[in-house]
Amino acid sequence: MKYKSPGIKQFIDELSYREMSERKAMTEKSIIDAVKGKRFFGFVEVDIQVPSSLRSDYSEFPPIFKNASISRNDLSPLMLQFAIDNNLYNQPQKSLIGSMFANKILLTTDLLQWYMDHGLEVTKVYQVVQFKAAACFRKFGETICNTRREGDSDQSKKILAETAKLTGNVVYGTTITDKEKFCDTKYTCSKYEATNLVNNTRFRSIEELDDDVFEVQLAKSRINLNTPIVVGFYHISNSQT
C-alpha cells in the first residue's frame, strides 16, 4: 500500500524523518550535545549522578526519582525509628525514592536536559529512541483548560468544568495503564470447579469469600497491548522539571 498510494508514501516518509536521522552512528558525546542543543527529542537510557561537589546542594531533596528496593539498612536514624515504631520495612520492599544517582534509567530528553542544566552528569548512554516533536494534543488541552476556566467564572457551567477535569485526568491515566496486570475473575460455588481453575496454567490467586464460594483470578489468555504509554510516560516525566 505504501508504494501504490503516493499520499501514504509521503505521510510515512514525513514520519520517518528525524533531525538526527541522517547520522548513521553517534557517540555518547554527540548524543549528549544533541540533547543539550535541543536537536534530539525522545528518550535516552543513561547512568546519571549528582557530582560530589553538588551533593550538599541537593541533600534535602535528591533530584533523581527512581524505584528501588529499600530495607531498614537504607533508612536514616529518624526514618528507621519511624519504621520500627510502625512495624514497617520488616522485609525489603520496592519504593519510589529520591536519589543522587540512577543506573540504566530511561529519561525524556527534556528531563535529561534539565538535569544537565542543573549540574548533573551523565556517565554512560545505553540507547536512544527518537521521536518527531509536535504539539499533537494542543487543541484537546486548550479545550480542557478553557472549559475549566469558564466553570470558575460562571457557576452555571461548573458541571462542565468538573467533567472536563475528569476527562483530562482519565485520558492521561489511561495512557499509562499496565494491561499485563489485567486478570479474568471467575466465581464458583463448587470446590471441584475451583480446583480445576487452580490447576489452570493461567491461575494467579484464589480467595474463599464464604463457605464454598470462591473468587479465582486467572491471567488473560490474550492481551492487546495498544495503549500509547509513551504519552503518559512523557507527561509524568516532564512534570518533574
Image (tube, rainbow, N blue to C red):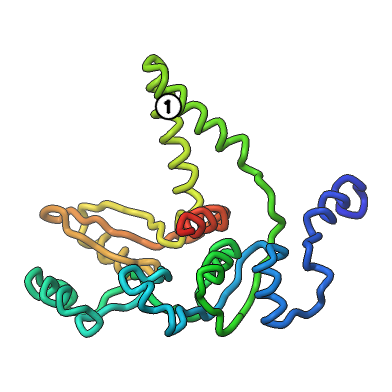
* Quarter of the rendering containing residue 196: bottom left
In this rendering, is residue 199 above or below 191?
A: below
In this rendering, is residue 7 above or below 120?
A: above
Q: Position of residue 41 (x, y in %)?
A: 67, 62
**Identity of the residue furthest to the top in this view:** 156
Q: Position of residue 231 (x, y in %)?
A: 56, 53
Front residue of 146/50: it is: 50
Q: Position of residue 4 (x, y in %)?
A: 92, 50
Q: What residue lies at 22% left-to-right and 79% top-to-bottom?
A: 75
* Quarter of the rendering containing residue 13: bottom right
Front residue of 146/5: it is: 146
* Quarter of the rendering containing residue 44: bottom right
In this rendering, is residue 37 above or below 89?
A: above
Front residue of 56/137: it is: 56
Left or right of 199, for residue 109: right
Residue at the spot of label 1:
161
Mark 1 element type: helix
Please state which amino acid type lies under the numbered disc 1: Ala
Left or right of 234, for residue 3: right
Q: What residue lies at 51% left-to-right and 51% top-to-bottom?
A: 175
Q: Is residue 224 visible?
A: no
Q: What residue lies at 54% left-to-right and 57% top-to-bottom?
A: 234
